[in-house]
Image: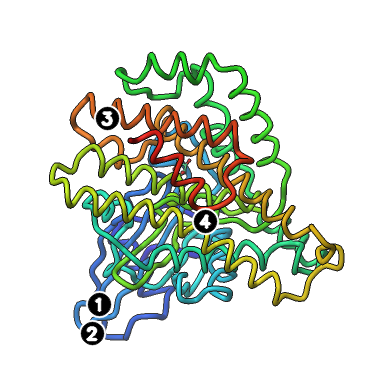
Amino acid sequence: MTDFSTKYFTMNEEQAIEYAKEKLGYFKQDAELTCKEIGDGNLNYVFHLVDQKNGDSIILKQAGPIARISDEFKLSPDRNRIESDILKIQYDFVPAHTPKTYQYDPIMNCFAMEDLSDYEIMRAALIKHEIFPEFADHITTFMAKTLLLTSDIVMNHKEKKELVKSFINPELCEISEDLVYTEPFYDCERNEVFPATRPFVEKEIWADDTLRLETAKLKFEFLTNAQSLIHGDLHTGSVFIKQGETKVIDPEFAFYGPAGYDIGNIVANLIFAFANGQATMTDESKRNEFTSYILTTIEDVIDLFKQKFGKLWQEADKELVATYDGFYDYYLNSILKDTAAVAGLELSRRIIGLAKVADITSIEDEKARQQAEENCLTIAKQFIINRDQYLNGADFVNQVKKVFQ
Ligand code: SR1
Ligand code: MG
């Protein structure tokens, strides 16, 4: 019998079945369990456990000691506690868009959660050019609630500081500090630049001192602005979707950071989907339908976020000074400014840096990929340098249209 109670080790599929029987208390006594490891992210092991006899199923997520993407990243498996804790908080605020979690085990660094295998990872669905009309509504409900209700605007400041403490996440933050804010903006060994795009990167990104200075300011904003309990990695690979339903998963990068970080990640990853549609769809009417859908979604993500955030703000019992005239506009504008900047950083790092996105790498034609990459980087520069000029959805969309026309 395997010992799951004293020493951490990473499980294989057979051990995950044994673990479920011995530790989870979720399946019926007569369960006939099968298990498949389905993790395709960069960091964790994800076991899909199914009781073939009674039809029950669950997901068991275990943090490994090193990242699957590269053994250069050694990470504390305590990130599994952070993920399981934040999922509970997010579930309390937005149950419709958060998976339900069942049990966290601090020895094996794993937790069980609702099986979402009838959903699809949104990035994969977007690469197939599927359309999800309700996504903008769902994700803005998720972001408005999680970003405002965990902030000093509405929280007791001592309780908020307790949360800040509990979500100190130094190793995963360091990954973002390096991969998002630092490495893409110089000729770092760890970058992986598509050869055809390299001359553009050298001239337009690495040689641009104005851009680099702005990224330095933004890195310090990320390091120091404990504004909201953010998801921290809210790209389309962290969203499970099916028609009419959206669930946000994988918040292991969570910590107290700038609220615009989450919104900017969503915007940038929608732009990657747009770039993929432009580059790969040969049927003009289908291409127009898909790319228009993406642009409408970007516009709605910004405008619905503003609308919902504003409504929650009005209804909330707030910190006194947050009620002073002009403070709301100042606060919202600073989130929008960070949104544009982070969208620019995410667009840059997924093109230049180590961690790529399939929306771009799956573009087979070399010229088309180069054009898509250069367009994303051109938008990125504008978003970073002129980040105070994107105040509503149309401002973001017009920037995309201008570059991709
Ligand atoms: C070493 S981890 C690389 C990337 O994968 C995660 O999903 C984050 O986006 C991280 O930057
Ligand atoms: Mg992830």
- Mark 2 and mark 3 in contact (Cβ < 8 Å)? no
Label 1, secondary structure: give it. strand
The mark tally for this picture is: 4
| Residue type marked 1 | Asp
| Residue type marked 4 | Ile
Which residue sits at x=50%, y=21%? Answer: 205
Task: State the mark number for residue 302.
Answer: 4
- Mark 2 and mark 4 in contact (Cβ < 8 Å)? no
Q: Is the C terminus in the top left, top right, bottom left or bottom right quadrant?
A: top left
| Residue type marked 2 | Asn
The foreground one among 81 and 262 is 262
Category of crowding for the residue at label 2, using alpha-carbon neighbours closer than 10 angstroms: few (below 14), some (14–19), many (at least 20) = few
Res 58 → quadrant:
bottom left
Q: CA distance from mark 4 to mark 2?
A: 44 Å
Q: CA distance from mark 4 to mark 3?
A: 27 Å
Which of pointers 4 and 2 indicates the residue nearer the eye?
Answer: 4
- Decide if ligand 2 comes within 8 Å of the CB at mark 1: no
Q: Is the N terminus in the top left, top right, bottom left or bottom right quadrant?
A: bottom left
Q: Which residue is mark 2?
A: 54
Q: CA distance from mark 1 to mark 4?
A: 42 Å
Q: CA distance from mark 3 to mark 2?
A: 47 Å
| Residue type marked 3 | Arg
Label 4, secondary structure: give it. helix
Which residue sits at x=45%, y=76%? Answer: 96
Say left or right for 74 vs 280.
right
Which of pointers 3 and 2 indicates the residue nearer the eye?
Answer: 3
